[in-house]
Amino acid sequence: MKKILIADDRSETRELVRVTLSEEDFEILEAGDGGQALQLARSESPDLLILDVMMPGGLDGYQVCKQLKSDEKTSETIVLMLTAKGQDVDRETGFECGADGYFTKPFSPLQLLDKVNEVLN
């Protein structure tokens, strides 16, 4: 069973993503801020991290992604950014940090599910 970590400070967004992914057989973990996301990614080794950019707690999604991708233990974790920051410069920053995909809010749950299945298979 593939393990997915959803990191977003809004519980409503985490719930929407969780419900979207419930169509498949995934183990779902959740984090409400960047520090918790980084800690869970390191301790639980998820196959995929769905990561918001703007989060409280001192670490934003870009910083979390950059730290994970620069750490030998977590560098293979697939990171999909899911954020309201949708300008070209935001996308570029996400990919420069090592993100494997970038979705802007509001997002299509079906497109997200398709991308998750694509990157995990």
Image: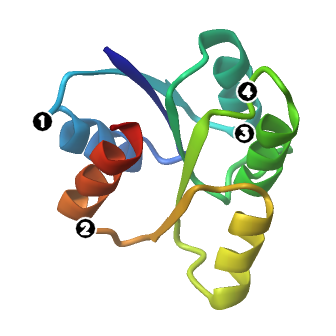
Residue 57 visible in this rendered orientation of the protein? no
Instruction: Name the amino acid type tagged 2.
Output: Ser
- Farthest front residue in view: 121
Q: CA distance from mark 4 to mark 1?
A: 26 Å
Q: Secondary structure at mark 2?
A: loop
Are the two marked residues, 3 and 1, in contact with CB atoms closer than 8 angstroms? no
Q: In this rendering, which labeled residue sits more in front, label 3 or label 1? A: 1
Which residue bears the numbered disc 3? 34
Residue neighbourhood size for the residue with mark 1, other residues' Cα within 10 Å, grouped as few (<14), some (14–19), many (≥20): few
- Residue at the image position 38 percent from the left and 37 percent from the top: 120
Query: What count of labels does the image hold?
Result: 4
- Applied colour scheme: rainbow
Q: Earlier in the sequence, mark 4 or mark 1?
A: 1
Sooner in the amino-acid sequence: mark 3 or mark 2: 3
Q: Secondary structure at mark 4?
A: loop
Q: Residue at x 56, y 41 (%)?
A: 78
Q: Earlier in the sequence, mark 3 or mark 1?
A: 1
Q: Quadrant of residue 99?
A: bottom right
Give the quarter of the image for residue 95.
bottom right
Q: CA distance from mark 3 to mark 2?
A: 24 Å
Q: Which mark is residue 74?
A: 4
Q: Which quarter of the figure has residue 19?
A: top left
Query: Dot 2: within a 10 Å radius of its alpha carbon, few (fewer than 14), some, or many (20 or more) residues?
Result: few
Task: Tell me where residue 89 appears, x and y as whole percent.
Answer: 73, 85
Tell which circle, 3 or 4, labels the residue nearer the N-terminal end. Answer: 3
Please tell me which of labels 2 and 4 falls first in the chain.
4
Q: Earlier in the sequence, mark 1 or mark 2?
A: 1
Characterize the local packing of mark 4: few (<14), some (14-19) or many (20 or more) Cα atoms within 10 angstroms. some
Looking at the image, residue 57 sits to the left or right of residue 33; the answer is right
Label 2, on which residue?
A: 108
Secondary element type, mark 1? loop
